[in-house]
Amino acid sequence: MFHRNIKLIIAGLIIVTGIWQMTEGNIGNGIFLILLSAIPIFLYFKNEFILLAFLKLRKQDFEGAKKWLAYIKSPETALVQKQQGYFNYLHGIMLSQTNINQAEKYFKKAIELGLSMDMDLAVAKLNLAGVAMTRRRKLEATSLLNEAKKLDKQNMLKDQIVMMKEQMKKI
């Protein structure tokens, strides 16, 4: 995994080569190279390993997702801030199955760095509410559940939120 700015340098070099090809009379090659430069620019904003990890998670393949995330050695240099948030979010989702203490740290870091979709933010806050509830921090869990409910505009998490509120009454 290399630094995120190298992708922009590669895109710039491809664009310069495309312009050079156009000045030499090879218009088709130049247009192709300029269009080809969109790939490194896209990968600057959407990291390829995070995209592949999301695909593995859709298939419930947690080991495969861990494998793809392991390719990112230093997320601070390889990823932009939102991607770092999703890097931590994915780690939190995978660890929420086994180690809830580590998952809490990852979810808090993901919320701090920012997630671009409200649904992802709602899932992170819902998981943090579950952690707070298991630690008997009812006030924190209530506020996190209310925030998750506000962020869940399509009511996809409605059943989980209602279930957690019912469990909270028992505490």
Image: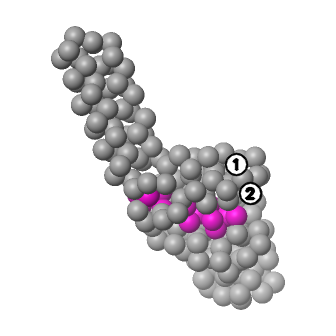
In the figure, 128 relative to 82: above or below? Answer: below
Q: Can residue 144 be seen at all in this image of the molecule?
A: no
At 41% from the left and 47% from the top, the residue drawn is 44
* Quarter of image, res 15: top left
Residue 71 included in the magenta stretch of the image: no
Residues packed near mark 2 inside 10 Å, few (<14), some (14 to 19) or many (20 plus): some
Is residue 83 in the magenta section?
yes
The magenta segment is 78-94
Determine contact: label 1, label 2, CB under 8 Å.
yes
Residue 62, disc: 2
Q: Position of residue 74 (x, y in %)?
A: 48, 65
Q: Position of residue 119 (x, y in %)?
A: 58, 55
Q: Earlier in the sequence, mark 1 or mark 2?
A: 1
Q: Which of the two residues, 71 or 162, is positioned nearer the viewer here?
A: 71
Note whether 4 is above or below 139 in the view shown: above
Within 10 Å of disc 1 (Cα), the crowding (few <14, some 14-19, many 20+) is some
* Horizontal side, residue 35 vs residue 156: left or right: left
Asked if one can make out residue 105 in the rendered structure from this viewpoint, the answer is yes
Disc 1 secondary structure class: helix
**Residue 28 location, x and y as percent?**
33, 12
